[in-house]
Image (tube, rainbow, N blue to C red):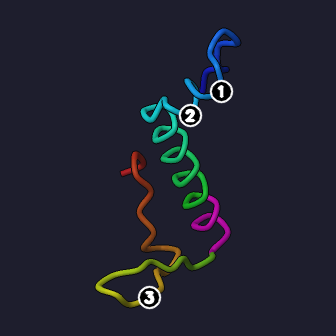
Amino acid sequence: MDVPEPSRSPLELVDDLDRIEEALALAVADALRMHKRAGNHICVGRDGKVEWIQPEDIVVPGDE
């Protein structure tokens, strides 16, 4: 990921939603990879209920 340009104000950086969403998506994908590799379950919310996902069933966006 690129380093923010020093000429941009903090408000401009916070308003850059595209970069924020990209950073969050990368962080989530990294966390899913780490859980899968370590053999840890994850939980997700589906239809108002908590569902546990087995490590072998974790799908990492971009790794399909």
Task: Say few, some or many: other residues with alpha carbon within 10 Å of mark 3 (under 14 / 14 to 19 / 20 or more).
Answer: few
Please say whether residue 1 is one of the residues in the magenta stretch: no
Q: Secondary structure at mark 2?
A: helix
CA separation in Å, label 3 and label 2: 32 Å
Figure quadrant of residue 47: bottom left
Which secondary structure dominates the residues rendered in magenta? Answer: helix
Specify the farthest residue to the left. 47
Q: Relative to residue 45, is residue 2 drawn left or right? A: right
Q: Secondary structure at mark 3?
A: strand
Please report the bounds of the magenta region as a residue range.
34-39
Query: Residue under circle 3?
Result: 50
Give the answer, above or below, for where 31 lies relative to 50.
Answer: above
Residue in view at x 34 percent, y 87 percent: 48
Specify the farthest residue to the bottom. 49
Q: Nearer the viewer, mark 1 or mark 3?
A: 1
Q: Earlier in the sequence, mark 3 or mark 2?
A: 2
CA separation in Å, label 2 and label 1: 6 Å
Please say whether residue 37 is one of the residues in the magenta stretch: yes
Q: Relative to residue 61, is residue 31 drawn left or right? A: right
Question: Which residue is nearer to you in this view: 22 or 12?
Answer: 12
Q: Amino acid at mark 3?
A: Val
Q: Nearer the viewer, mark 3 or mark 2?
A: 2
Query: Residue under circle 1?
Result: 10
Q: Amino acid at mark 2?
A: Val
Query: Residue under circle 2?
Result: 14
Specify the farthest residue to the right. 6
Residues at badges 2 and 1 in contact (C-beta under 8 Å)?
yes
